[in-house]
Image: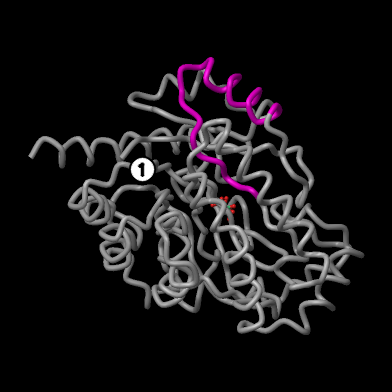
Amino acid sequence: MYMTFRWYGPNDPISLDYISQIPKMKGIVSSLHDEATGDAWSYEKIKMYKENIEKSGLNFKVIESVPVHEDIKLGRSSRDKYIENYITTIKNLAKAGLEVITYNFMPVFDWTRSSLDTQHTDGSNSLTYKHKDVLAMDPTSPDLTLPAWVKYSKEELLSLFEAYKNVDSEGLWKNLEYFLKAIVPTAHEYGIKLAIHPDDPPWSIFGLPRIIVNKASLERVLSIVDVPENGLCLCTGSLGVDPNNDCEDIVKTFASRKRIHFVHARNVSIDGNNDFSEVKHTNDVGAINFVKILKAYHDVDFDGPIRPDHGRMIWGETGLAGYGLYDRALGAMYLQGIWDALDSK
Ligand code: DNO
């Protein structure tokens, strides 16, 4: 395994230098954040971005994410144009030396929380999810704004909600199947690994379908096109909030088959009634035991990228919710320490 850190580009308040000072940090995970969803990324732009990152001494092999245009998820006739662009992007990323592309297939919203800064008694704060609060939210209401939702205007949101009335879970699966059958052959040919991120949280919200929610759905994604490049971004924090998901078993199953191309390491406490809170990475709290999870990776000689996922805000830090420096750096050290101990056995 090698350690990576997510960086949001030149506007990220955390500099590449700071990240490279974290012991044993090897790589950056990032994206061309100024590209409009659906556009093809040019080789020159990718190359420049990569060279700039690599000046810090860190490698840049993992893209998170190349977002999937809503027309693809909706199965609209315009999807073919966006799929063509996606294929061009895959080729250009491969040509520039990138190895892994992370993406998700969640309708409209990516990760969703009811609060981005729940205060804890020790003075830290973190992202939390209260199911009742989310049920009470109307994402199309002009009064509601949450940072993860800024992608669409209220008008666009209304029309997307209207369009998704015709797409149920099976419809979304069909559209994912169409997408993967179109893009995976290129990924296979160019040797670039696709890593689908599970839905976060792994259940339907706002009446929109969510399908990448458990072991069976991960199995189904892989079977759509059964080649090594069609793989997973295994996020324990997303899957682990559902007590029915046994993350250790999921890791054992897919890591041994070499289909996990990227690891997101986040710990969560399950608070009942579908509520959950994001917590420190250590195994004295939360539902995820990284000693056991990392052992499952170590047992099969996992050599791919891992990153500490969302951290709390500690020591008075402010910044991008979930993406501060301090707690993620502590997480990286904890994970690396476990790995080194496993290595030395
Ligand atoms: C949350 C992240 C996700 C992830 C996308 C992948 O912090 O794990 O936003 O990047 O779902 O496409």
Badge 1 residue CB within 8 Å of ligand 1: no
- Residue at image position (40%, 24%) is 22
Kind of residue indicated by mark 1:
Gly
The answer to whether 120 appears left or right of 32 in the picture is left
Q: Secondary structure at mark 1?
A: loop
> Is 341 part of what is drawn in magenta?
no
Q: Which percent across, then down, holds residue 284? A: 27, 53
Does residue 22 show up?
A: yes
Q: Which percent across, then down, holds residue 72? A: 72, 65
Where is mark 1, residue-wise? Answer: 304
Among the 4 quarters of the image, the one containing residue 175: bottom right
- Residue at image position (61%, 70%) is 176
The answer to whether 50 appears left or right of 136 in the picture is left
* Boundaries of the magenta span: 44-66
The answer to whether 73 appears left or right of 97 in the picture is right
Say which quadrant the N terminus sits in.
top left
Q: Is residue 74 above or below residue 148?
A: below
The answer to whether 206 appears left or right of 297 in the picture is right
Q: Is residue 132 above or below residue 285?
A: below
Q: Which percent across, then down, holds residue 311? A: 48, 44
Among the 4 quarters of the image, the one containing residue 111: bottom right
Does residue 271 show up?
A: no
Among the 4 quarters of the image, the one containing residue 272: bottom left
Front in this rendered view, residue 263 or 320: 263
Front in this rendered view, residue 183 or 312: 183
